[in-house]
Image: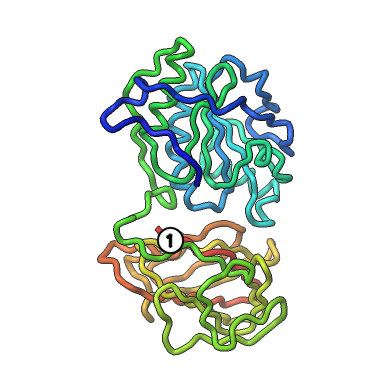
Amino acid sequence: MGTLWRAPAGLHVASAALPDEGELPSLAGATRWLNSEPLTPAGLHGNVVVVDFWTYTCINWQRQLPYLRAWAAKYASQGLVVIGVHTPEFSFEHNRDNVRRAVQETGISYPVATDNDYAVWLAFANHYWPALYFADNQGRIRHHHFGEGGYGQSEMVIQQLLAEAGCDGGTDLVSVDARGLEVPAEWASLRSPENYTGHERTENFASPGGVARGKPHAYAVPARLELNEWALSGDWTMEEEATTLNAASGQIACRFHARDLSLVMGPAELATPVRFSIVLDGRPPGDSHGADVDSTGTGTVGQQRVYQLIRQPGPIADRTLEITFVDPGAQAYCFTFG
């Protein structure tokens, strides 16, 4: 993940020297800007800048987002500019309407550069979602952070860079009210890693006979799934990126250990929603249902996004989720857990 700068134990970050990690790279490779005219390092000179690499279905970024919104709101008047660089992971995340809707629905008001060609990503030599880069008012990168967490440290870096620029950022840290997908993972009980459903990156696929790559195939769910295994039932086509249901009543099953289970998915035809239902250990989810299903387990796939299927009140144990699609045309991309 790279080397992270950390203040010595017990030392406030503002009392320590931040290294110079080089000049703020060009943003010229952005394919489009939302909430702003195109920005440049020269035009940003005099501002403290936080550049956030994200893609809208990344659950790790979604759990980081409340802090980005809070920092942008709190420190804008003191010269902080937060810039989101949306570099897509999945092909549908290149779609400008999908990105624009995500920006609106998540309440992002700071500038967003869409980076469909990965030009800004490459200019920063970035490798991660999410990734934060902190630049001072002279256009020099002074800190970076990869992944979730470290929010207090990151905010103290912002405060130090604002102080160096002659602004009083204070020492109080923001408090956020995270809800839905933005709620932090319950790390103590999380034993299931992210897993993709396209054949290029999937792991622990348990349907008998394995994957029939790139062609329609009748799959079955085995009698028993081990922890973190998943399987298909029905007529599916598994491509590199996604798995698509060809006929009604197909099923995905997954054995997991986590408070939350979400699935990145969408309809193959955007104008044709796909109905589905879920059961947890063979029963409707009840109080364990996620935001995108009701207590009976009923939901609809209408957009290409993350669908929260399970949020358990506890206790957390090994559980089996089965999702059955009433209609054909569902496309599944990735399981995420929290």
Q: Residues within 10 Å of mark 1 (few under 14, many from 20)?
A: many
Q: Position of residue 16 (x, y in %)?
A: 37, 22
Q: Position of residue 154 (x, y in %)?
A: 42, 32
Q: Nearer the viewer, residue 120 or 65?
A: 120
Left or right: 335 in relation to 29: left
Residue in view at x 52 percent, y 44 percent:
130
Say which residue label 1 marks.
337
Name the quadrant containing residue 90. Answer: bottom right
Q: Nearer the viewer, residue 127 or 243?
A: 127
- Which quarter shows the C terminus? bottom left
Q: Residue furthest top?
A: 166
Residue in view at x 67 percent, y 77 percent:
237
- The secondary structure type at the circle numbered 1 is strand
Left or right: 198 in relation to 70: right
Three-letter code for the amino acid on which mark 1 is drawn = Phe
Residue in view at x 58 percent, y 36 percent:
84
Q: Nearer the viewer, residue 219 or 203?
A: 203
